[in-house]
Amino acid sequence: MSVKPIREHTGKSLLARWLGEYSKGKHSYANPGVLVSPEVLNKTGGQTWDMILDENPWLKTTKLVAKPDQLIKRRGKAGLIAVNKTFEEAKDWVMERMCKEQKIETVTGQLTHFLIEPLIVHKQEEEFYICMLSHRYYDELLFYHEGGVDVGDVDSKAEKMHLPTGEAMTEAAVITKLLSKVAAGKQANLASFIVSLFAFYRDLHFAYLEINPLVMLEDNTVVPLDMAAKIDETANFLCAQKWGPIDWPPPFGRDAFPEEALIRDMDGKTGASLKLTILNDRGRVWTMVAGGGASVVYADTVADYGWGHELAN
């Protein structure tokens, strides 16, 4: 299985497209926001701010949130989320950072893609945490009734539910196993959303889907505010039509080499695992093909002999 992370905008766009179908019209997610690329720096072609505004007129009529969309964790704590902005303020905030270097914890890289989306005004007690992840023979759901930036170690305090591969999920089981600490008036609608979300997750071959916070407003509308997701790329032959075009971004701080892109494309077309990661394109020690963890052993051995700084891949 070739599991690849996707942009937040990609995950939200897929959810906006398919949630209504998987919930039989009970739930919807209308606005996944707009992705802003470095093309806005070129006023003569590609994506422009005028084009963005023409295609998304809601940008002028609502308060906005802007943030990088490059597989960066803990953006809020890094000061990389702009909240309650007008369109012009959000645009200025993005342009101040577009293609500029940014150090996040120990990694330095360029900020090149930003997500701008509507601001959802809500209360702290309306925030939840949910995560779905796939194991070999079952799927696991984690739910915590106090989501948000300071959710902490959810693995130790979240309610958990294991669902064997192929087994159907029921709203009753979700309420019993995950929602015992949620207000009774919210349980039924939240359980319905989770069942629909899981159907979406399973049918589109996600391997990981985390929403924090997942907000349930006073009118029982459920909105994902922050999303991280990974997809099994080998399911492309099954899901290409439902997925549509997908951008597979490299990790923040490391631009993809053409050779890596070639191997990634090959990896997506086979059930085998094909990986190439360039650590140092000027390095003099290159390891040959290795599987079953041998590449890690090779890398450790090279480092043990004092050549870690020359390790190329």
Image (cartoon, rainbow, N blue to C red):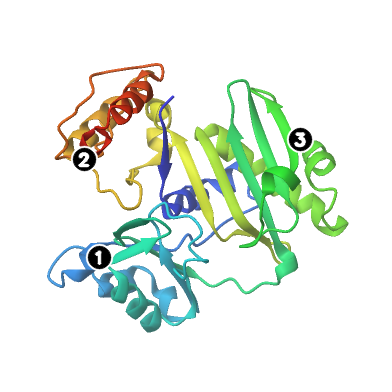
Is disc 3 placed on a helix, strand or loop?
loop
Q: Name the residue under label 3.
A: 170
Q: Tell me which label, 3 or 2, sits earlier in the chain.
A: 3
Residue at the outermost right position:
184
Dot in front, 3 or 1:
1
For this view, does 119 lie left or right of residue 195?
Answer: left
Q: Mark 1 points at which residue?
A: 99
Compute the Cα span from label 3 to label 2. 49 Å
For this view, does 271 lie left or right of residue 153?
Answer: left
Q: How crowded is mark 1: few (under 14 residues within 10 Å), some or many (20 or more)?
A: some
For this view, does 228 lie left or right of residue 277?
Answer: right
User: Which residue: 52% across, 45% down?
Assistant: 18
Q: Tell me which label, 3 or 1, sits earlier in the chain.
A: 1
Q: Tell me which label, 1 or 2, sits earlier in the chain.
A: 1
Is disc 2 placed on a helix, strand or loop?
loop
Asked whether residue 130 appears in the rendered view, the answer is yes
Asked whether residue 158 appears in the rendered view, the answer is no
How many numbered circles does the render carry? 3
For this view, does 100 lie left or right of residue 148?
Answer: left
Residue 152, image x and y in percent?
Answer: 66, 55
Q: Name the residue under label 2.
A: 280
User: Which residue: 28% across, 32% down?
Assistant: 264
Quadrant showing the C terminus: top left
Q: What residue type is labelled 2?
A: Asn
Is disc 1 placed on a helix, strand or loop?
loop
Q: What residue type is labelled 3?
A: Thr
User: Which residue: 64% across, 53% down?
Assistant: 27
User: Which residue: 24% across, 39% down?
Assistant: 309
